[in-house]
Amino acid sequence: MAGSGSPLRVGVLALQGDVREHVRVLTGLGAEATPVRRASELTGVDGLVIPGGESTVIDKLSRGFGLAEPIRDARRRGMPMFGTCAGLILLADRIVDGISGQETFGGLDVTVRRNAFGSQLDSFETDLDVPVVGPEPVHAVFIRAPLVAETGPGATPLAALGDGTVVAVEQGAVMGTSFHPEVTGESRFHRYFLEKVADAAG
């Protein structure tokens, strides 16, 4: 764990997905970013990022590598976690169209719909107002993205599309986005997450 004056140590779940992009953003913000592939590596970090990729694959691999329950335990103990795209699915408490047997780590009182915007061909970009990260709009890239179909009382929406569809949400030290800030050079979400990590690390 990070001590006084030392960089925050943030793990990036490195089972599948855009791990390097998250490591690059976190490192650029002064954090010590490290890939996490086994439970022993989870104990040495102050926060965890769950990248975009295939939520079903990451779910299966996390169970196969013995990581799923340690991640849930760490979250219950208050470890900050940030999921993008597939990571949002994995941090949701409920999935309305998951495959048979699909599990999540939980932490966000939301119901998500996988691939809600269609296939890779239906990927799109738009600008979003996200007051918690600053006054300037966020340029968001949606790639086979999920959406938040329902937000429970425990979760707080951070951003929505023009039609009101929630695409970013937080609950305490856990946050998730439908889009990929890590692929556009957008660092404000990671900076906001690092504030949560710093608060939790004391």
Image (spheres, rainbow, N blue to C red):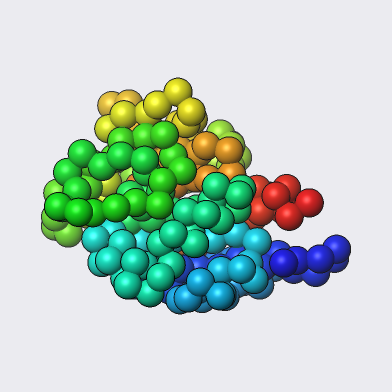
Image spot of residue 50 (x, y percent): 44, 60
Above or below, 180 against 66 in this view is above
Q: Can residue 83 be seen by looking at this rendering?
A: yes
Image spot of residue 16 (x, y percent): 34, 72
Which residue is at a point 31% across and 35% down the rendered structure image?
Answer: 111
What is the tally of numbered marks visible in this picture?
A: 0
Position of 196 with respect to 109 (left or right) is right
Front residue of 6 and 27: 6
Image spot of residue 26 (x, y percent): 59, 66
Q: Quadrant of residue 152?
A: top left
Which residue is at a point 45% across and 23% down the rendered structure image?
Answer: 153
Q: Quadrant of residue 194?
A: bottom right
Point out the image quarter for the N terminus.
bottom right
Q: Work out which residue is located at the far right of the displayed protein and give it.
A: 4
Q: Can residue 165 be seen by looking at this rendering?
A: no
Above or below, 190 against 38 in this view is above
Which residue is at a point 46% across and 43% down the rendered structure image?
Answer: 107
Position of 156 with respect to 100 (left or right) is right
Which residue is at a point 41% across and 62% down the rendered structure image?
Answer: 68
Front residue of 59 and 29: 59
Above or below, 160 against 143 in this view is above
Image spot of residue 125 (x, y percent): 31, 49
